[in-house]
Image: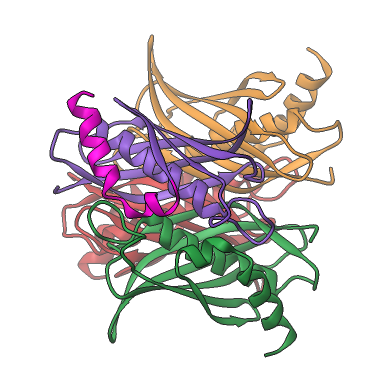
Chain colours: A orange, B red, C green, D purple
């Protein structure tokens, strides 16, 4: 595990919300971070699909860590704004969110994330996110 | 408790994500729904504030139930898209999300929500949401 | 006309896009700016209503000048992101956009705008905007 | 020119806003539409870059026609909501907006657009849009 990956994983481990959602960090690389969580019985909405907050939470964290990965060591980021478009019901075995940097910057980092619902071998695009992160003092 | 309130509270009780986040439905009226949750140790981000997914989840559900309250009995709604602007760190005793209908419609309901962090008597505006709900078969 | 109003009107006069859209600055006060334009024959979409870019342009400028009004003299602002929800067809005599500051800040100013279509005495809410402005060197 | 392209170009020709902005439809294909306009002296903001309404207008129309291209003949679409993130100042010879369908649907079409500023051979990514279109009676 290199320094960048360790830095991202250490920070992720401090996000208690991620543990609450059952999330794990699958990939932690430069400008690209993947976070996944099962569609478990404790994260649903009233019709039995995953609540929008699950896709949002995974996508926001994946995008935030993608932003963090392109910033100098010791940085922290916060979400300024995030928009999610939900494309299909989030049903399946698990959700996988892939965060990316759309445009890096010293003051503003524009980020995106795609969220997939996986059921066995089948993968469906269930959400897309577009947002803004800003670096803050760590 | 009138029929509308019962309908909203029954649906809310089936959102297991809300229980996971520790959320309760404070108010359930026509076009206005309030949902609150403590800033508890299991819903934080890495810097110790509430994760953006908490403000999002409470705001999205409050807005969704505000939409549902103006639709015919037997309706369900799903979030098509939701944008959240985070205004200040979500620190305090609890978050309170107030959802409202910006514009009702048969095919599209535009909704908003404001999220406040409360600490004792003090109340701070921490997030604002603007989004789109669509009715679906119940 | 006070200094603030003069500063906002001078800047507005340099936005050639506003002249192209037929826009005028109706009100220019602290944290609240109103810009209006006729629904003229040169700003339409294919069905005869005003193009979404008209409501967006008026709303974005009104919100931007509302942000500028709360910043120190000599500042400039740029739009980082802006979301518009269109609530009804923009038909009528003219569109009136009212911009406001949702949350001021040194690095980030969160802004909103409401857009109305006016026909004689009747006024209809046709769009709502929510976005982020950042100060830049003037 | 095939039927689809003719249908899109006929509709585009009725958008007087596009003529006002100096826009032309470069490509009109299934699920992908390109619209361009010069960064001319009549579409600027106060600092001399293209106004955000230009990138928005081109992107929104390109995304809308991409949506229309995947709908049955005789359909029309309207923008329900659109978010734009501005990535860099829109300076250069012209802006080129490429609209695409993120997810087609009978009731909801999720769309995106990327906007580039071109100066000679150089091309810079200046904006990204994500939004929702709905079919309406033509």
- On the image, the x and y values in percent for residue C118 come to 32, 78
The residues colored magenta run: D1-22
Q: Which residue is drawn at the image coordinates 71% and 30% (left, top)?
A: A13
Q: Where is residue A132 in the image (x, y as percent from the top left)?
A: 63, 44
- Number of residue marks: 0
From the image, give the main secondary structure of the stretch colored magenta: helix
The quadrant holding residue B2 is bottom left
In the image, taking residue A83 as reference, residue B41 lies left or right, namely right
Q: In this view, does C26 lie to the left or right of D62?
A: right
- The one nearer the camera, D127 or A93, is D127
* Figure quadrant of the N terminus of chain D: top left
- Residue B88: quarter of image: bottom right
Q: Residue furthest bottom?
A: C1
Q: Residue D28 in the image: state x and y as whole percent.
A: 32, 29
Residue at 54%, 57% in the rendered image? D42
**Does any portion of residue B42 appear in the rendered image?**
no
Q: Which residue is drawn at 55% across and 29% down?
A: A22
């Amino acid at each position: 595990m290199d320094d960048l990956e360790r830095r991202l994983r250490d920070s992720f481990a401090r996000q208690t919300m991620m543990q609450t959602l059952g999330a794990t960090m699958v990939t932690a690389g430069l400008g690209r971070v993947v976070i996944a969580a099962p569609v478990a019985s404790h994260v649903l909405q009233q019709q039995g699909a995953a609540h929008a907050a699950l896709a949002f939470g995974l996508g926001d964290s994946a995008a935030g860590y993608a932003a963090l990965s392109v910033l100098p060591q010791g940085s922290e980021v916060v979400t300024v704004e995030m928009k999610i478009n939900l494309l299909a019901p989030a049903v399946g075995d698990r959700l996988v969110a892939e965060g990316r940097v759309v445009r890096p910057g010293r003051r503003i980092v524009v980020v995106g994330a795609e969220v997939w619902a996986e059921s066995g071998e089948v993968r469906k695009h269930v959400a897309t996110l577009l947002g803004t992160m800003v670096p803050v003092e760590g």
